Amino acid sequence: MELKDCIFNRRSVRKYLDLEVPREMVGEIIQAGSMAPSSGNLQNWGFIIVRDKSARNKMADACLQQDWMANANVHIVVCGLEDPSKHHYGLRGERLYTVQNCAAAIQNMLLTAHDLGLGSCWIGGFDEGMVKDICDIPDNVRPQAVLAFGIPDEKPDIPKRENIYNMSFFEEYDSKVEDSDECFGYHGDLMLKSLKSSKETVEKKTDKWLDKLEKHTKKFLNNRKENK
């Protein structure tokens, strides 16, 4: 999938098929997260993979009773290791850089999941104490987010996005120009027209990916049963 298509068409998915996500795909997602940039290359993150059904039910409850999460075949708890950032950068490193580093890793993981044909959702609302208890996370490590992954059973609509002209300033905050295309070229109004014209093509590609993924997953499950 082209990077632009992946970025523009990723959605938060909250309905999943009752199918297992192959472990190879989980590995690719984790690998992508580990390749994110981090302050001073500290890589001060940790990824806890949660597949047990009972643990996923508890995690859904910890995430403010978001019951739909339990149907996602894989949860990944992204943790921030604050001590390295604090040691190198003080309070700003502890409170800000650790969050930024984990956020960069999370975005890599979400885009990779979409490229693989999986659905995903970034959950930031949770009871931190409960998540720590479920995953036995030590005191000096803080869960930053819980990510849900699975084979999607929905295609959420594209939410309305603010035109980049309204959020972009030149040289100084709140300083704009009259003609957005003059400054952004293709990335002004022309970009919005291009996105609309390519929507059907992208949806067809997504359908093909989902069909391929479902066949691969069923084959994987059948082979595992035969080998038992």
Image (cartoon, rainbow, N blue to C red):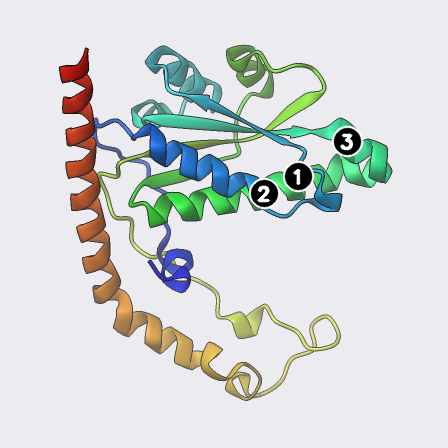
Question: Disc 2 residue type?
Answer: Ala
Residue at (72% x, 19% y) in the render: 140
Secondary structure under tag 3 reads helix
Q: Quadrant of the C terminus?
A: top left
Residue at 59% over, 68% down: 167
Q: Is residue 110 above or below residue 46?
A: below
Q: Residue furthest front?
A: 227
- Specify the label residue 64 is tagged with: none
Q: Decide: marks 1, 2 in contact (CB < 8 A)?
A: yes
Say left or right for 144 vs 39: left
Residue placed under numbered mark 1 in the picture: 99
The numbered dot on residue 103 is: 2
- Classify 10 Å Cα crowding around label 3: few (below 14), some (14-19), many (20 and above): some
**Mark 2 vs mark 3: which is more N-terminal?**
3
**Dividing the picture into quarters, in which one does residue 217 lie?**
top left
Q: Nearer the viewer, mark 2 or mark 3?
A: 3
Position of 27 with respect to 43 (left or right) is left
What percent of the width, then of the height, locates residue 171? 74, 77
Q: Is residue 163 above or below residue 183?
A: above
Which residue is identified by label 3? 84
CA–CA distance between discs 2 and 3? 17 Å
Whole-percent x, y for residue 154 in the image: 23, 43
Identify which amino acid the numbered label 3 is placed on.
Pro
Marks 3 and 1, Cα distance to the nearest angstrom?
Answer: 13 Å
